[in-house]
Amino acid sequence: MKFTRQRLRLFQVLGWLLLVTTWVVQVLGLSWRTLQPVRSLRTLIIFTLLALFWVLITVILKQSRWQQRQAFLLDLTIMCDLLVGLLLVLPRALGAVALANPVGRGGLICWSVTLLIAYCPPAAVHVPLGLKGKYALIQRLLVTEARVLLIISLVLLVLGAD
């Protein structure tokens, strides 16, 4: 996905709206299909603190000169939006019971490793001799692996909810 400031701002606003909606659903006790008020206050506070931490990361990275900072910010925002959306739609996927389950824990670990894989420097990756020096190809492979890992992590988190 191509980076634009408007797209980043859109996803940031979406993330905050999802978080506020999650708080409203929980506080008012609303329920509809999978939207249930079963989140703990501790989980909501942790997600709110993580959202504030993401704002801090955004401010810090905007001051850096890292070449891929904009793409990183957009990817981080999208990943966080997915996690908050999962908390809203399927709150049991991020509950203590689900994360005590090895499947749910594996999903959270995979989610955590996703950005590390996508932004690993291509020169630091051990590749076969035929791919040495083809940094653009290696970077595309790393990003593709990270996308697959993100999908796997979301599936594992959903499976851990049962």
Image (cartoon, rainbow, N blue to C red):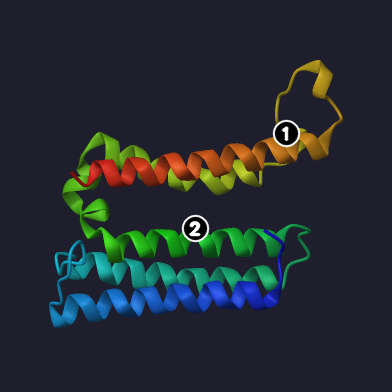
Q: Where is residue 42 in the image (x, y as percent from the top left)?
A: 21, 67
Q: Position of residue 119 (x, y in %)?
A: 66, 47
In this picture, residue 60 sits left or right of residue 80: right
Quadrant of the image for the N terminus? Answer: bottom right
What is the three-letter code of the residue carrying label 2? Met
In this picture, residue 149 sits left or right of residue 4: left
**Mark 1, residue position:** 124
Q: Crowding near pointer 1: few (<14 within 10 Å), some, many (20+)?
A: few
Question: Foreground mark, 2 or 1?
Answer: 2
**Mark 2, residue position:** 79
The answer to whether the residue labelled 2 contacts the one labelled 1, judged by CB atoms less than 8 Å apart, is no
Residue at the (43%, 71%) spot, across then down: 51
* Residue nearer the viewer, 132 or 88: 88
Q: Crowding near pointer 2: few (<14 within 10 Å), some, many (20+)?
A: some
Residue at the (34%, 80%) spot, across then down: 20
Which element carries disc 1, helix, strand or loop? helix
